[in-house]
Image: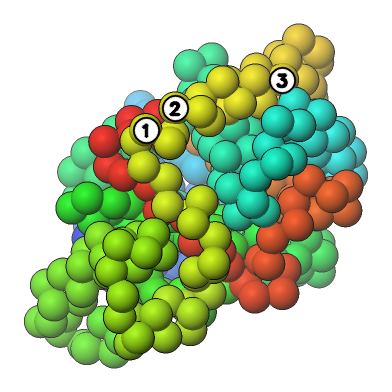
Amino acid sequence: MKLIESIASYTGESYRNIQNVINEDIKKMIGDVIKSPQLAYDIDENLMHELIEMDIFKKHEGVFSPNTAIFLEEDIEMITEPVLVIGSELADVIKESGKELESYSPNIKNFIGSIIGAGQGLHSVMKDAGVASNWQTKTGKYEKSKIDFNEECEAYLRFGEDFQIKRIHRGNQYTSVVIGAGQNNYISNIFSLNSMNPNNSKNTFYISLANYLTDTLPLLVSGKIKDDSLMNLAKASNIDVEDKDIIINYNDSIKYQSIITKITKACTSYFFDSNNIDVVIKLLQSTIVGKQGAPIENMMMNFWRYLRKATAIKLYDNGFLTDSIPSNGSITVFYENKIKYF
């Protein structure tokens, strides 16, 4: 059995701290423990301390149990059909409630409608309802981070790429949001170079470069500066330089608020005004780690990864999403940091 980790992190340091601990041997050990829980007591005490601090395991009254989503093949097979049904229905809800976005560019429809309105908006409601964890407030060595695992198997691979995964980088004036699993974007290119430096002694250089580009590329796309080299970099990074709307300034952002609210309310109603959230909770309780005591709220985000894959496929099928992610791998949107509701 091989586990694939999914790391969500709002800090590069926490991400690197997790990667420094989680290797193939550790992932195999985690999988073995899920299948044979008594093996948890054989884990080195210092290592178990790190795994508990990452919220992979928890200890209560001397008993170890899983504290995050670790979905094995039988779990993924079990959730597949419900996820496909819910994803298809949710995509229709997003399209109907997001009609006002029809006049906007494909990049904006994705960011405002799918990422913010449906994704972040609904997840915020779920956190308030106690069915999704607020891992962004986590402190310590692994602050603002979360790790989940899925078994690499045919059932997992059938879901395909995650068109809605996002990478966020905050500069001094702007924040960039890269949407899509493709690695050909300016953030991935910068930090792949950084990872080639074994001791990370140049980390400050790469972070500063990322910050500079995050604040400068919006000026280029907006037409406030001209630079041929920077333009070539932007085009090579799958930035749609012809779409001025991908630069969202504070005054421009106000027009999106009511649209975001409408989409979030429609998605919330779909889950909470019916029994759909109860269906999801029962599915999570029925997973192997769910039966071993993993909290529902700590498994919800990993379930959402499957759901957003299924939803995205239907959103491209029903015509709400028409951007270039399926062909180019990613799109990028920038917004001013003083916008607080993104």
Between the residue at mark 1 and the residue at mark 3, the CA separation in whole angstroms equals 25 Å
The kind of secondary structure element at disc 3 is: helix
As measured in the structure, the alpha-carbon distance from the residue carrying label 2 to the one carrying label 1 is 6 Å
The image position of residue 286, as x and y in percent, is 74, 34
Along the horizontal axis of the image, is 41 left or right of 142?
A: right
Q: Is residue 258 visible?
A: yes
Q: Disc 2 marks which residue?
A: 254
- Is 99 placed above or below 179 here? above
Dot 2 and dot 1 residues touching (CB under 8 Å): yes
At label 3, the amino acid type is Ala
Question: Mark 3 touching mark 2, by CB under 8 A?
Answer: no
Q: Is residue 74 left or right of residue 296?
A: right
Q: Nearer the viewer, residue 274 or 67?
A: 274
Number of callouts = 3
Amino acid type at image mark 2 = Ile
Specify few, some or many for label 1: CA neighbours under 10 Å numbering under 14, 14-19, or 20 or more.
Answer: few
* Distance CA(mark 3)–CA(mark 2): 20 Å
- Residue on which the image places disc 1: 251
Which residue, given by chain and number where applicable, does mark 3 sit on?
Answer: 266
User: N-terminal of the two: label 1 or label 3?
Assistant: 1
Position of 264 with respect to 73 (left or right) is left
Sequence-first disc among 3 and 2: 2
How busy is the neighbourhood of tag 3: few (under 14 within 10 Å), some, or many (20 plus)? many
User: Which residue appears at 56% of the width and 20% of the height?
Assistant: 258
